[in-house]
Amino acid sequence: EAITVGELANRMAERGADLVKALFKMGSPVTLTQTIDQDTAELLVTEFGHRIKRVSESDIDIQSTEDVDAPETLQPRPPVVTIMGHVDHGKTSLLDALRGTDVATGEAGGITQHIGAYQVTVKDGSKITFLDTPGHEAFSEMRARGANITDIVVLVVAADDGLRPQTIEAINHTKAAGVPMIVAINKIDKPEAKPQKVREELLQHEVIVEDMGGDVQDVEVSALKKTNLDALIEKIQLQAELLELRANPDRDAEGTVVEAKLDKGRGPVATILVGRGTLRVGDVFVVGAESGKVRALIDDKGRNVKEAGPSTPVEVLGISGVPGAGDPLTVVENEARAREVAAYRAGVIQQKRTTAAPASLESMFSALREKQAIEYPVVVKADTQGSVEAIVGALNKIGTEDIRVRILSAAVGGITESDVVLASASRAPIIGFNVRPNAKAREIATRDGVAFKYYDVIYNLTDEIRAGMAGQLGPEA
Ligand code: GDP
């Protein structure tokens, strides 16, 4: 029995892009719509089962490899969208404008609540979920924690300003995650807007829009004048259709913490984005190292609701403490079980904090060998554009048939928080050529176990990486 990659992704409640990536690493480059045989499918399920286990490092983990939803249980679910782009290019304005397109807001009489994500109902009745924290850092931080909740990225570029450093960072983070992108060329109302120039600049970063013969959708909008928002929504819907996003709503809920806080009046409150199943008032759950019983569910319009299905963001009350963003929520059978799993996880988290060692190049290579990965991700920062180009050129040349360097980002400047978050999400080291990390970057790197490698001579850099690759591939390479 053959199954398409997209279908299998749905049944495993994993992102299609992650499966495609895993398959690529296993040596079978296929697309979402292509079929794979039973054996390959089983391999993937095992691989991802192991991965889930590794993430929580729990022997009594509640998510098991058999936990795959049968195809007949799957139903379409709304896409989850994150907006990224350079500061002041209009991310917040666009989020607000899109929120204003919700046809359900008026009739429901609700008042907009900022809970970390919101859902709009489009004219045709379908829904789209937007994460309310724009930017690539939050996105990659979630990803580093194993929470791949974004289906589609909308990249905002101001037409009067063009591509700026954070635009390029956003492109790198999106590509590293394998999430499809739609470009919203904003501020088109301004007389000095040059949308075509934006398309040309994108080309230099290998983002090729349809007009230029590529497959990235783009749309000219004005968040200020609310121009062309319908067209943007249509493109999101089109992209969502291609992804065939589906989930089983009729099972115990699983979700991810988008945002959490201690509320003076209400106690610990977390916004959960439901991944699969339906979360209901009265459900007993574990979330991160906390547990609880759903006392109330409040939607993004401030209304009490009884339940929330796949892709729906909802505030949950009744948690023992404040979980972290990116923590998974899982409904379990009873409170004793919830406390048991939560206590276990708390122990694991504590242990992890005290034993986390930075990933060395060597451990990176051995991890790669185990996974038979053929890509070695790195983040490159250097002192001049000339060095960046020389390093990129040199790194691209040292690949072999079995393994090659994948440059997630290469830029001029000191090592920043954004670089560390990007590296962490892809388990990559950061190569600093005549540059060093700032204090914040250092702090996050220590927390997340990201390694820095400093060089001031290019051939030392390439030699070390080449030697590492060769050593790990063994005599047959
Ligand atoms: P963010 O930093 O990316 O979230 O950007 P903001 O949404 O805060 O917008 C930055 C500035 O650009 C604000 O002064 C907005 O009013 C303005 N702005 C946003 N979108 C548009 C637009 O479509 N046209 C014009 N003319 N100004 C815009």
Image (tube, rainbow, N blue to C red):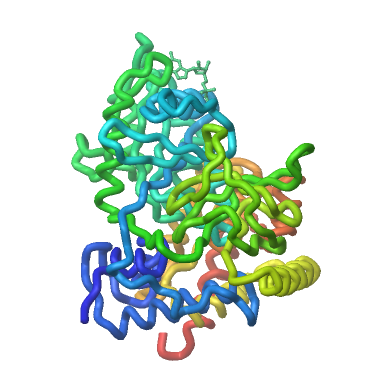
- Which part of the image, by quadrant, shows the C terminus? bottom left
Residue that protrudes farthest toward the bottom in the picture: 475
Q: Is residue 351 toward the left or the right of residue 327 in the image?
A: right
Q: Quadrant of the N terminus?
A: bottom left
- Judge by depth and name the residue closer to the eye, 332 or 353: 332
Q: Is residue 382 visible?
A: no
Relative to 65, residue 394 above or below:
above
Give the camera-side residue of 362 and 274.
Answer: 274
Residue shown at the point (48%, 67%) measured from the top left: 376
Give the image location of residue 346, x and y in percent.
Answer: 75, 68
Find residue 417 and report its image quarter. Answer: top right
Residue drawn at x 59%, y 65% is: 460
Image: 418 above or below 469 = above
User: At x 38% / y 23%, what residue is drawn?
Assistant: 186
Q: Is residue 34 visible?
A: yes
Q: Relative to the observer, which residue lies in front, 61 or 216?
A: 61
Which x, y percent locates residue 384?
56, 41
How far from the left and from the top, in percent, is residue 439?
76, 45
Taking 460 as reference, is 215 left or right? left
Asked if 75 appears above or below 122 in the picture, the reply is below
Q: Residue at left 60%, top 52%?
A: 257
